Amino acid sequence: MQNILQPTGDQVRAFRDRATGEPIAMLNLLKFKAKAEYEDGRPCDLSGREAYGLYAKAFKEINEPKGVRVLYAGEVRGLLIGTGDDLWDEVAIIQYPSTQVMLDMLRDKDYQQAQLHRAAGLEGQLLIECGPGKTF
């Protein structure tokens, strides 16, 4: 497992090719930097979590009108099954009306601007695509 902040071209093409037109959910596993670090080197007193909070606020403002919904977001408290130490700080599940809505978001200039806060705050992230929900 490797934490990367942006998808590769191959990953984006595979994501696009899996599109069904149905809603998708993205499971976000987030690890924050202790102190935010902006790529342009600006002075900053924010924690990584605080910088990511600026991104999250902009994300919702940009995407909720397009039907994107935050189904769950919360702090990781510990493991019940499995082993590992200090893997993730927060988890979020975001539902998109379709793959295309997410692809369009990635090209949106306002979203790209908001990503500066995401990059400043995150040490790493796993973003896992999930298909339409099913009954247990």
Image: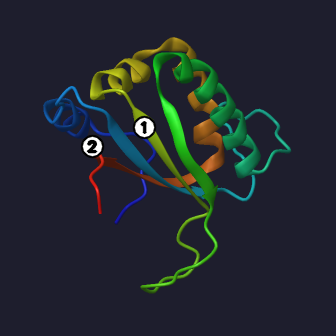
Q: Residue 133: percent from the left, percent from the top?
A: 30, 48
Q: Residue 62: percent from the left, percent from the top?
A: 57, 19
Answer with left or right where residue 26 lies relative to residue 132. right
Q: Residue at x 63, y 56 (%)?
A: 74
Residue 107: mark? none
| Residue 39 at least partly seen | no
Q: Name the residue under label 2.
A: 132
Q: Mark 1 points at which residue?
A: 95
| Residue 29 at least partly seen | yes
Answer with left or right where residue 52 lies relative to residue 115. right
Q: What residue type is labelled 2?
A: Pro
Q: In this view, does 121 lie above or below 67?
A: below
Q: Residue 100 sits in which quadrant?
A: top left
Answer with left or right where residue 43 lies relative to residue 85. right
Q: Residue 52: percent from the left, percent from the top?
A: 66, 42
Answer with left or right where residue 42 lies relative to residue 10. right
CA distance separating discs 2 and 1: 10 Å
Label 2 residue SS: loop
Q: Which residue is drawn at 18% across and 31% down?
A: 19
Crowding at dot 1, Cα within 10 Å, few <14 / some 14-19 / many 20+, comes out as many
Q: Which residue is drawn at 40% across and 17% down?
A: 107
Q: Residue 41: percent from the left, percent from the top?
A: 71, 35
Q: What residue type is labelled 1?
A: Gln
Observer-nearest residue: 104 or 24?
A: 24
